[in-house]
Image: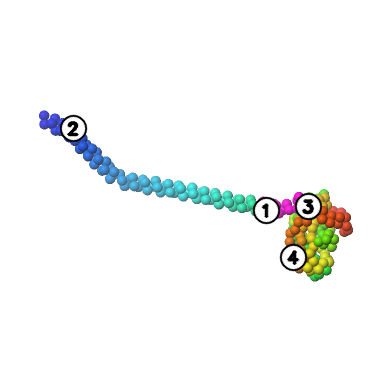
Amino acid sequence: MLDKSISLKFSRGTKGGQYSILHEINQLVLQLFCPVNCIYNFYLYSSLSSFIMRHLLILLSIAFFWSCAQKNQIQEGESEQEEEVGTAEGAAVVKVEAQGNAQTYTFLVTVQSPDTGCDQYADWWEVVSLDGDLIYRRVLLHSHVSEQPFTRSGGAVAIEAEQEVYVRAHMNNKGYGTKVMKGSPEAGFETAELAADFAKDLDKQEPLPKDCDF
């Protein structure tokens, strides 16, 4: 009878007590497992940070190598463009250096041309006055398929130190190129554009190539 009374009292009066006991148990569990939970959270955070950093480094590496590849591709494209200078317009004069004294200058002329052999090659470069008169012509005896650009000297070029002239190149099947150099021995030479039909009749004036060796 007493046991029944105690049991009844407990069941009626300890609804709040049951909640209190469960709350205490929950707090005890939290206290027991908090270190484990903290360690787990720290490990999880460290692993996540390591994961993010690792993938961030991978992305940065990819971006770096992509940037280098783009830069190399641009440089290669510029080099290819430089190599193809004169392909559409014929032969191009890309550099001129004058040595010596007035009326007896030696010109060192660098030509870029799409030579393929005797069927297509730069057959001369020449010095022309601004009025279109031929001052000097250097005839080229063979093609320069494997030597591009190539430099050949010529003279004597009979001009004064301050006299401005055009230096242009000619191809046997394309005529005169439009990429020329303009300047004087005194001031130097710069790249210029010149119409292909400028003083075009000079291509019939001697000296002219007699043959192509190779």
Q: Are marks 2 and 1 in contact (CB under 8 Å)?
A: no
Judged from the image, the secondary structure of the residue bearing numbered disc 1 is helix
Circle 4 SS class? strand
What separation in Å lies between label 4 and label 3 (alpha carbons)?
24 Å
Q: Please give the residue where the numbered disc 3 appears in the rendered image.
A: 90
Q: Earlier in the sequence, mark 2 or mark 4?
A: 2
Q: Earlier in the sequence, mark 1 or mark 3?
A: 1
Q: Given contact means CB atoms under 8 Å apart, are the residues at marks 2 and 4 in contact? A: no
Residue 123: percent from left, percent from top: 82, 55
Mark 4 is on which residue type?
Gly
In the displayed structure image, the side of residue 53 where residue 99 appears, left or right: right
Mark 4: give few (<14), some (14-19) or many (20+) Cα within 10 Å. some
- Relative vertical location of residue 153 with respect to residue 20 in this rendering, above or below: below
Where, quadrant-wise, is the N terminus in this rendering?
Answer: top left
Q: Which residue is mark 2?
A: 11
Q: Residues within 10 Å of mark 2 (few under 14, many from 20)?
A: few
User: Which numbered disc, 2 or 1, marks the residue that appears first in the sequence?
Assistant: 2
Q: Is residue 68 visible?
A: yes
Q: Residue at x 52, y 48 (%)?
A: 59
Q: Residue at the location (84% across, 56% down)?
A: 199
Separation (CA) of disc 1 from disc 3: 19 Å
As drawn, which residue projects farthest toward the front? Answer: 131
Identified by mark 1, the residue type is: Glu
- Whether residue 143 appears in this view of the structure is no
Q: Provide the residue designation for mark 1.
A: 78
User: What's the residue at 87%, 54% (across, down)?
Assistant: 211
- Asked whether disc 1 touches disc 3, contact meaning CB atoms under 8 Å apart, the reply is no
Residue stretch in magenta? 77-93
